[in-house]
Amino acid sequence: MAHCAKRLSALLLAVLSIAIVTVPAFGEPLVWVSVLGRVQGSGQEYSSVVEILPSGSPTQVLEYMLVAELAPVGTYGAINYAAGVPVYGTITSLKASVTTTTGSGKGAVVTTTYYDGINNLKFNLSQSPTTPIQVDLDTPSLVSEWLAGGGASPGTYSTGPRKAGLPNGLGYDVMNIRPIAATSGPNQDTATLFGVPTDGQHVPVVLGTGTATILTAPAQAWSELVVSDKLPVPIGGDNSGIQSAGIIINGGTQLTFAATTDADPIIGFHNLFIQTPEPATIALLTLGLAGALAARRPSARR
């Protein structure tokens, strides 16, 4: 897991810290949510850019991964909004959970106290109807830890396809994806938090994985798989108006905000870029994919 976290860290940007300042400024997101991808069966690492073959090739399927990560200590940004005006601060610390054991033998009681990390998020996964490369999304399979909280959901399909004319009426987006970790009570002291394994350190956490089938892919084209905000919910609260989010920093400060469309959003997003290559590289890509698939095909020998 540590090795996986290091690889993911190299792919993701990060940011975070809190000494409150109310003067106008420009800040950075305190949490990042990213979507990474790879061609199914390719054996490649997940990446922020995936290259596929143009339409007319055998059906191609992408595997995508959803990842969240707190920003590092020292990040300056909006930590909450008062009457719609951002209140700025710096992430001064990230404190890891502490586990203690009282008693011994069968009567031992193990207690974990969480201080900083991510408890829940809420977002959409979609495409613009105007981009030339179009995909049909499946809802993600969330990691079990992110299905442990009440209201957790892999999301639901949009009410209709994002544009007319896609094959077989496909091309649906996934709305209201809600990874929520366990919470045993109505306040943040009872919430399970992820993303801070040791004091001062932040690591990417995998929320879930899914697939996307390529529907249209002209040559020399590109598109984005877009992750966008639907607001996390406060721990023990609802999802209306300016609110606390299920994200805690600086040893117990729960973030509050109105929306990520504000001038300085608290949550930032990294989208997945999908592209088809130039004609000169198509043959090489075809050979590479064919080789990867052949290697996975069972042998006919006995």
Image: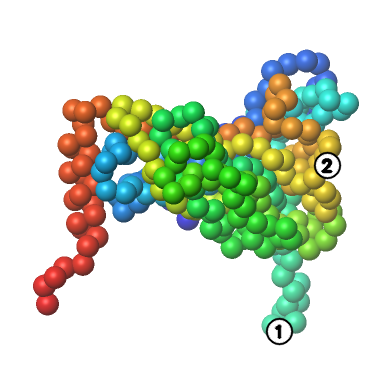
Residue on which the image places disc 1: 106
Along the viewing direction, whichever of 25 and 232 lies nearer the viewer: 232
Along the viewing direction, whichever of 98 and 203 lies nearer the viewer: 203
Which residue: 17% across, 36% down?
Answer: 283
Indicate left or right for 299 with 69 as reference. Answer: left
Measured Cα–Cα span from mark 2 to mark 1:
44 Å
Which residue: 29% across, 36% down?
Answer: 54
Query: Looking at the image, is 42 positioned above or below residue 300?
Result: above
Residue 129: x and y in percent read 51, 33
Residue 6 can be seen, yes or no: no
Element marked by disc 1: helix
Indicate left or right for 81 with 70 as reference. Answer: right
Q: Quadrant of residue 255?
A: top right
Q: Which mark is residue 240?
A: 2
Q: Mark 2 or mark 1, which has the lower sequence index? A: 1
Residue 293 can be seen, yes or no: yes
Which residue: 17% across, 44% down?
Answer: 287
Query: Looking at the image, is 111 positioned above or below residue 11?
Result: below
* Front of the two marks 2 and 1: 2
In the rendered image, the residue lying farthest to the right is 83
Residue 93: x and y in percent read 70, 38
